[in-house]
Image (cartoon, helix red, strand yellow):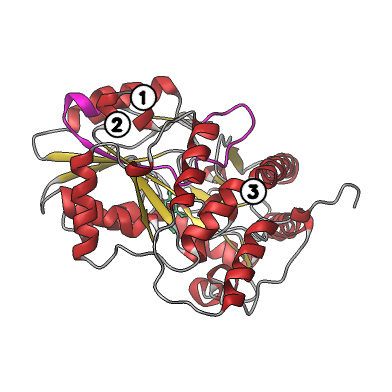
Amino acid sequence: MANETVFDQVINRKGTASAKWDYVDTLYKGNDLLPMWVADMDFQAPAPVIEAIQSRAAHGIFGYPTHTASVDKAVQSWAKRHYNWDIDPEDLIYTSGIVPTISRIIEAFTNEKDRIVIQTPVYHPFYDLVTNNKRELIKNPLIYDGTSYKMDFAQLESGIDSRTKMLILCNPHNPVGRVWTKEELEKLAQICVANDLLVVSDEIHADLLYEGFQHIPIASLSEEMASRTFTCLAPSKTFNLAGIQTSYVVIKNSVLRAGLKKHLTLNFMNMTNSFAELVTEVAYNQGEQWLQELRAYIQGNEQYVRRYVETHMPKISLVKPEGTYLLWLDCSKLGLSANERKKWLVEEARVALNHGPMFGKEEGDAFERMNIACPRKTIQEGLERIKKAYVQRGF
Ligand SMILES: Cc1ncc(COP(=O)(O)O)c(C=O)c1O
């Protein structure tokens, strides 16, 4: 292939204890399924990151790690370069994953039966984070106009009462792919400030943007927003490091920050692993060029899928993504129920997508989420499988 890039290389992930590849048939009860589900990429991390891991591993001693100040500088510089956001090293708390961190934030700063708002359809663990902690889940469904999504501010405002304490924001939004604009974030911020809501802003997809889009941390909008926001970030989606479990929270409010630190310590969650800070530092300091190429590649994949679907499967349409490497496919015109569609994809097309209802029973009923962070050849294979099943059904 002309102009082949590192991202075109198909690397066998089977037999590497990969959830995406080794667990797929069990989870989906299928046979030889092509995995286009869970949000990790079929690409190797940037070479300097792999080399740093190899060199640390070669040392051979994996005792308890301590914090190294140089990672703070890397994080600080990344936030400035990519989000034009000034953060201080003291604003940072390093953790072993965003989902467990959000759970601890909910525990530490809300009480049982407090109400927490999420904007659906949304990354499915948000539901469990609220309900497993015995908080009441309040849905603020996004409005879908047939091509894109926007926030429903009126519904949000009317649903807030004295028991509503927190909002969990997803920006960029998984699964609908929105990168919220300054205007949208300002309106949301105004409602949160007026109602004294704490905000957990999950910005894990912040670096995975399509051309022309800019990530804005909601905490960067004003002092008032900074003082009530927990911004959860990580290099894990950006550089494909989820298995290393590394993340961090930016908290400008010293009282909230001290509160979370104390809570993490009480729960013995105040330490990361030997590779966590290392990969964060190296990826942020040396991964810039790789990320630019990745973004272009993903954008190319999106265009490829769009054209293919428009040409061969016109009853499926793509919600145009602004960020993330996840596509949200509107399958409403297929005329199948959610369960029938799930069965059709697994048994006839033999692909594993994330089934829409997991992101919201009604909101996701007619949708499937497709992960396109893989070589173009894998995309082609997945689309051909779906097309064959589509034609066989006579859609
Ligand atoms: C919005 C969002 N938050 C968090 C995560 C997972 O974060 P972690 O692996 O750090 O818990 C994902 C993974 O897909 C995600 O999409």
The alpha-carbon separation of the residues under discs 1 and 3 comes to 28 Å
Q: Classify 10 Å Cα crowding around label 1: few (below 14), some (14-19), many (20 and above).
A: some
* Badge 3 amino acid: Gln
Q: Is residue 364 visible?
A: yes
Q: Nearer the viewer, residue 299 or 333?
A: 299
Mark nearer the viewer, 2 or 3: 3
Give percent across and percent down for residue 271: 34, 65
Query: Vertically, is 289 above or below 15?
Result: above
What kind of element bears circle 1? Answer: loop
Q: Residue furthest left?
A: 162
Question: Which of the two discs, 2 and 1, labels the residue nearer the N terminus?
Answer: 1
Which residue occupies the foreground of this view, 292 or 175?
A: 292
Residue 239, image x, y percentages: 59, 53
Residue 12 picture location, percent across and down:
71, 71
Q: Amino acid at mark 2?
A: Ala
Q: Main secondary structure of the magenta part?
A: loop
Mark number, residue 154? none
Instruction: Give the residue at x 65% y 76%.
Output: 14
Q: Which residue is mark 2?
A: 226
Q: Are marks 2 and 3 in contact (CB under 8 Å)?
A: no
Question: Which quadrant of the figure has residue 170?
Answer: top left
Q: Separation of disc 2 and disc 3 at Cα? A: 29 Å
Q: Residue sitting at 63 percent across and 69 percent down?
A: 55
Tell which circle, 2 or 3, labels the residue nearer the N-terminal end: 2
Graded by Cα atoms within 10 Å as few (under 14), some (14 to 19) or many (20 or more), the crowding at tag 3 reads some
Q: Are marks 2 and 1 in contact (CB under 8 Å)?
A: yes
Neighbourhood count class around disc 2 (C-alpha, 10 Å): few under 14, some 14–19, many 20 upward: some
Residue 56, placed above or below residue 357:
below
| Residue position marked by numbered label 3 in the rendering | 286
Residue at left 42%, top 31%?
Answer: 86
- Residue 44's quadrant in the figure? bottom right
Alpha-carbon distance for marks 2 and 1? 7 Å
